[in-house]
Amino acid sequence: AQSVAQPEDQVNVAEGNPLTVKCTYSVSGNPYLFWYVQYPNRGLQFLLKYITGDNLVKGSYGFEAEFNKSQTSFHLKKPSALVSDSALYFCAVRGSGSARQLTFGSGTQLTVLP
Amino acid sequence: EADIYQTPRYLVIGTGKKITLECSQTMGHDKMYWYQQDPGMELHLIHYSYGVNSTEKGDLSSESTVSRIRTEHFPLTLESARPSHTSQYLCASQPPGTGVNTEAFFGQGTRLTVV
């Protein structure tokens, strides 16, 4: 079975500082990894994905994520956080095997302090 | 903004009532999903469909049922609502193809409260 772990329920960072939201995964076969963001009372919005190729993936709103196969990680990063980045972030994985559904992590609440 | 719509956005309903949460997408996506999410919590897949007349139960057991009579429409029904059904319900869709490398598009969600 595939799974995703987001070890931090809450991440606080000062505006202008770099941010990292951690994600590790477990799948059979090649992993397809996604990050989504959820603002209050809204659905999920797609940020970025890793399919193949460069380990550093760039996405929307200045976010990027680094795929590390040996550590089975896909941490979300941004060089300079904005207050408007405050939201709930979900990491998700889909394996290349028969399980075609997305499996989501438990989410990390990011708060950027002014 | 993805063209996937959920109605209603908010619903407060009494115990024992039958309710249907609507989800429609205009993108021609064959795959559609329902997730249940408690506030600030992880998403749990409760139903999915890979095409018309195809529905499957997800990872989380749910008393709800779904139907997929048309490609664009994937309604979720609770025959008799209970307070334990209070949650946010998110609908998602995904374009045709193998699907493993395509992202899902989410609706804005329906926040259901059963009193």
Image: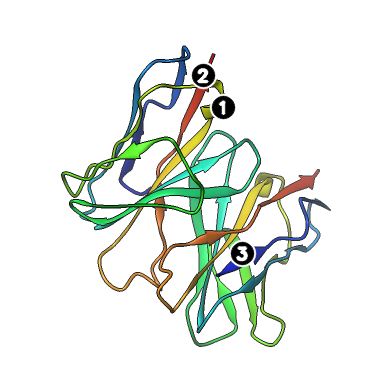
Q: Measuring from the top left, give residue B29's x and y in whole percent.
A: 25, 56
Residue appearing at x 16%, y 44% in the figure? B69
Residue appearing at x 26%, y 71% in the figure? B97
Location of residue A76 by image quarter: bottom right
> Disc 2 marks which residue?
B114
> Disc 1 marks which residue?
B84
Q: Closer to the observer: label 2 or label 3?
A: 2
Q: Is residue B95 above or below residue A15?
A: below
Both labels 1 and 2 in a single chain: yes
Q: Chain of mark 2?
A: B
Instruction: Rate crowding at label 1 as few (under 14), some (14 to 19) or many (20 or more) other CA atoms within 10 Å.
Output: few
Comparing A34 with B41, the one in front is B41
Instruction: Rate crowding at label 2 as few (under 14), some (14 to 19) or many (20 or more) other CA atoms within 10 Å.
Output: some
Q: Which mark is residue B42?
A: none
From the image, which quarter does the N terminus of chain A lie in?
bottom right
Q: Is residue B72 above or below residue A97?
A: above
In the image, taking residue A6 as reference, residue B43 lies left or right, namely: left
Location of residue B68 by image quarter: top left
Q: Measuring from the top left, give residue B39's x and y in whole percent.
A: 63, 35
Q: Is residue B44 above or below residue A68?
A: above
Q: Closer to the observer: label 1 or label 3?
A: 1
> Disc 3 marks which residue?
A63
Q: Secondary structure at mark 2?
A: strand
Q: Label 1 amino acid?
A: Ser
